[in-house]
Amino acid sequence: MTATYSDAQLDALREVANIGSSTAATALSSMTGISVTVSTPHARAMALADAIEYAGPGETVVTTILIPVVGDLDAIVLMVLQPETEAAACRLLGVEQDSEVGVSALLELGNILGASYLGALVTLTALRLEPTPPEMVRDMLAATLASALLIDVREEIVFVLESTLSIASHQCSPMFLFVPTRGSVDDILKRLHLTA
Amino acid sequence: MGELAVSGAAKDVLTTIGLGSCVGLVLLDSSRSTAGLAHVVYPHSTPDTRSGGQPAKYADTVVPALVGAMGRLGSLRGALEAVLVGGARMFAFVRAPELDIGSANVDAVARALAQAEIPIRISLTGGSIGRSVRVRAAGGLIAIREAGTANRVYSTAGGLLEEVASG
């Protein structure tokens, strides 16, 4: 299924992510008071089942921030934090993992990054897209992702963005999944002047 | 996802991990030591998807497909017992009943089993937790794990499918 999208199309999506990354870096720097850089070196389009497998062992309990998106098209943005990534994120944000503050900091992190990616997509496509309040789930990776991707979506292509946050020499790499509803992938590509 | 497997071999373990809203359907025939497992994704097939050759993916087509596969191992429908695992609602924001695929999947599989007159012996379904299931045909052993907990093990060894251990 990956072959459905050309390198040029995936490059364009990675560019969207990179523009979003710089917005996110600015927001995170002002939130933490420390200089934060965000990069998104990889953008991939995958079949749903492949994306779940790619994300890691299905039984591992991971933390997922889910942001439903409404507007001209419905979509879901997911941020997946493997256990070690979650610990790194909490260290970067200066909060204690599993504490109330830790949870709200992770929600905020997902919100900032997710909203930044969406903002870039909105700017480049002129689509109206709005994030709704995020929700956090800690459960088996496959159970979380499959269930999120199956909610009213039924699009079997998922965009996977791997981003890296850096503060000084510390890094953490959450994975983002952007799951548009059926048909809207082509709409997005058309608006990026990359008709499928 | 959407696949099925059957086995009558002692060494085989049929596995599906990380079931959220999806349902794992286990069929056991303790008299012949055979087992089947299907990973059901959606409650209803459509004419479009029915031609796709993945009957296990849909609750309304999975039961005949799995019963048929068990039949090829020599197991008759009347000897089968069922176990249902999964069908959770993983996200609180899913409030609209039509978006709660998990409970729709459980209901649809249960209806199809009733139609086929196959009794459900164990149902570890619903709630908001992910689950895995592992099945060994020999001895009718089933291990079910919920996220962050130990396996619960069930067996048909005593004649009835019952919980024998956890850990």
Image: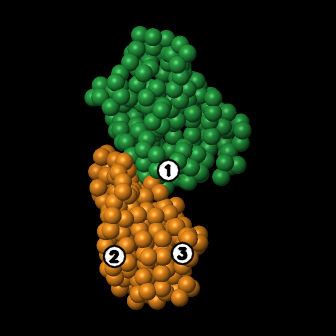
Chain colours: A green, B orange
Whichever of labels 3 and 2 marks the residue nearer the N terminus, that label is 3
Disc 3 marks which residue? B10
Give the residue type that dot 1 points to: Gly
Q: Check chain identity for marks 2 and 1: say if they share one.
A: no
- Kind of residue at badge 3: Ala
Please identify, in this view, whether the residue under mark 2 or under mark 1 is nearer the observer. 2
Residue B114 in the image: x percent, y percent? Answer: 33, 81
Q: Relative to residue A118, is residue B160 drawn left or right?
A: left
Q: Quadrant of the image for the C terminus of chain A?
A: top right
Is residue A180 placed above or below B7 in the rendered structure?
above
Q: Nearer the viewer, residue B47 or B88?
A: B88
| Marks 2 and 1, how far apart at CA | 27 Å
Q: Is residue A126 left or right of residue A64?
A: right
SS type, badge 3: loop
The chain holding disc 1 is A
| Residue toward you, A153 or A107 | A107
Tell me, yes or no, whether the two marked residues, 2 and 1, touch with CB atoms within 8 Å. no
Question: Which mark, by number, is residue A58?
Answer: 1
